[in-house]
Image (spheres, rainbow, N blue to C red):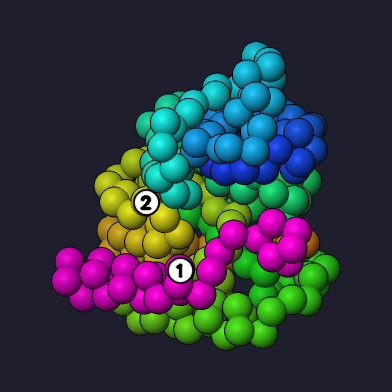
């Protein structure tokens, strides 16, 4: 068993959640925290019947967003290392050891899995998403004084002490630049590792929209400039 809490925020992922849970369980984490953000597609019904000793299931009564779901999960996490796992199939749980290795070795407090470095396979998708990601990463790096390549990655791991040192305010995808800037301002040590990426199209269930990019820019300004 790995001294690891895996937080899985989920919203309307009834087709992929059973598969990702099976894959996560194979990595043998001590704790899995699933936060159902008021799903309406049958995800909630699946979770009512899902039983495992190392799983905690929490539910929101209204849809609040990924940031709120992660915040709820963090409030229940008890292990030394905390990792965020999306409920889709874009990220491979077999790469957990790669992600948490810099923390286990005592070199890092925060590790981001980058889709833009390394030699692992990456599905080729949307140019404008790529460009938007690069812009948001660039702006975040300015205020965080870092040289990260992928702050919007869905794979992030933290020492519990590090992620517990900040107060997360954003409810939606703005959580990504927010936690990056806040952790950097507190001097926590960042590492990046290359990961594989099996991205989805919108037809396959991808949820992030161009409007989330605009919100992210405002979040960067708010937490980077006005704080």
Location of the C terminus (image quadrant): bottom left
Q: Are marks 1 and 2 in contact (CB under 8 Å)?
A: no
Examine the rendered structure and indicate whether residue 144 appears above or below residue 76. below
Q: Residues within 10 Å of mark 2 (few under 14, many from 20)?
A: some
Residue at x 49% of width, y 26% of height? 58
Camera sees residue 146: no
Among the 4 quarters of the image, the one containing residue 32: top right
User: Could you tell me which secondary element the residue under label 1 belongs to?
Assistant: helix
Task: Using the numbered discs, state the Cα–Cα distance from disc 1 to disc 2 in whole angstroms.
Answer: 12 Å
Among the 4 quarters of the image, the one containing residue 192: bottom right
Kindly identify which residue carries mark 2: 171
Kindly identify which residue carries mark 1: 212
Location of the N terminus (image quadrant): top right
Q: Give the image location of residue 129, x and y in percent.
A: 60, 78
Residue at x 69% of width, y 20% of height? 50
Mark nearer the N terminus (1 vs 2): 2
Q: Give the image location of residue 224, x and y in percent.
A: 26, 72
Membership of 225 in magenta stretch: yes
Residue toward you, 211 or 83: 211
Examine the rendered structure and indicate whether residue 52 appears above or below residue 164. above
Residue at x 37% of width, y 51% of height? 171
Highlighted range, magenta: 201-227
Q: Which residue of the protein is positioned furthest toward the left in this rendering?
A: 226
């Amino acid at each position: 068993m790995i001294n690891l809490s895996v937080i899985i925020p989920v919203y309307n992922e009834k087709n992929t959640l059973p598969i990702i849970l099976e894959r996560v369980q194979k990595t043998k984490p001590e704790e899995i925290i699933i936060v159902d953000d008021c799903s309406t597609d049958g995800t909630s019904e699946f979770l009512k019947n899902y039983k495992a000793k190392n799983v905690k299931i929490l539910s929101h009564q209204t849809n609040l967003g990924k940031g709120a779901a992660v915040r709820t999960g963090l409030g229940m996490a008890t292990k030394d290392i905390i990792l965020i796992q999306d409920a889709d199939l874009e990220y491979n749980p077999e790469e957990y050891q790669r992600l948490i290795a810099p923390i286990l070795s005592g070199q890092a407090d925060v590790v981001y899995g980058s889709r833009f470095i390394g030699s692992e396979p990456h599905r080729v998708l949307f140019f404008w998403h790529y460009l938007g990601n690069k812009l948001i990463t660039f702006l975040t790096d300015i205020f965080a004084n870092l040289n990260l390549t992928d702050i919007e990655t869905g794979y992030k791991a933290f020492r519990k002490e590090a992620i517990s040192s900040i107060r997360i305010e954003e409810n939606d995808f703005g959580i990504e630049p927010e936690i990056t800037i806040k952790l950097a301002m507190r001097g926590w040590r960042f590492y990046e590792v290359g990961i594989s990426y099996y991205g989805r199209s919108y037809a396959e269930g991808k949820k992030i929209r161009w409007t989330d990019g605009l919100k992210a820019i405002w979040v960067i300004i708010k937490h980077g400039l006005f704080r």
